[in-house]
Image (spheres, rainbow, N blue to C red):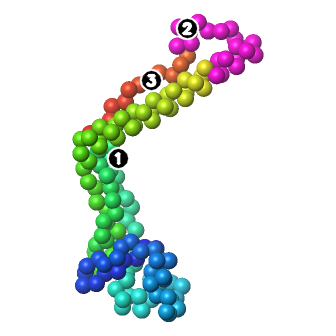
Amino acid sequence: MIFAQIINNIVVQYPLTEAELRSQFTVCALPADLSTCDYIQQAGFVVVRDVEQPEFNPITQSITLSDPECIDGEWRQKWRITELDEATIAENIQQQRNALFAVWRDQCLSTCIQILADVQSGVRQPPTIPELLAELPEYVLQEFPR
């Protein structure tokens, strides 16, 4: 459960975990269920309902938790999606390509290790270079949407 302190419809503290909220009230015993505690409500603390993170493109956008909003008397989590600058987008694309290349490289290595094991155990003859290349997984340069 996440909390916020709201005074005069202004978010003063957010986000607050239950432990963080309890640490602010060390002089009194708080009940187990803080969502119904009048004492913390009088101090402006409210429960903030989780809202599922919206979909976004991690290559071209970033997402951050922003101040909650009150809808129909209930405080709800709010997300902010921000467009990234071109340099960051280019860096993100390169990181994705590097990660995909590493996966492909590992697949190639695994294939070669299996072929070597098969040759050494007599299961098969050593492949020619064209045969070896034909057995390796295909590398596909992926385009990323902007």
| Amino acid, disc 1 | Pro
The residue wearing badge 3 is 139
CB of mark 2 within 8 Å of CB of mark 3? Answer: no
Magenta region, residue range: 113-134
For marks 2 and 3, the one nearer the N-term is 2
Q: Position of residue 21 (x, y in %)?
A: 45, 80
Callout 3: SS: loop
Quadrant showing the C terminus: top left
In this orientation, does residue 122 appear? yes
For marks 3 and 1, the one nearer the N-term is 1
48 to 57, vertically: above or below: below
The residue wearing badge 1 is 58
91 to 67, vertically: above or below: above
Q: Position of residue 141 (x, y in %)?
A: 38, 26
Q: Is residue 132 magenta?
A: yes
**10 Å crowding of disc 3: few (<14), some (14-19), many (20+):** few
Callout 1: SS: loop
Q: CA distance from mark 2 to mark 3?
A: 17 Å
15 to 102, vertically: above or below: below
State the image quarter where residue 80 is shown. bottom left
Mark number, residue 131: none
| Amino acid, disc 2 | Ile
Please indicate whether residue 40 sits to the left or right of residue 26 in the image. left
Q: Nearer the viewer, residue 39 or 52?
A: 39
Q: Main secondary structure of the magenta part?
A: helix
Q: Residue sitting at 39 percent across and 33 percent down?
A: 97
For marks 2 and 1, the one nearer the N-term is 1
| Amino acid, disc 3 | Tyr
For the image, the number of numbered tags is 3
The residue wearing badge 2 is 129
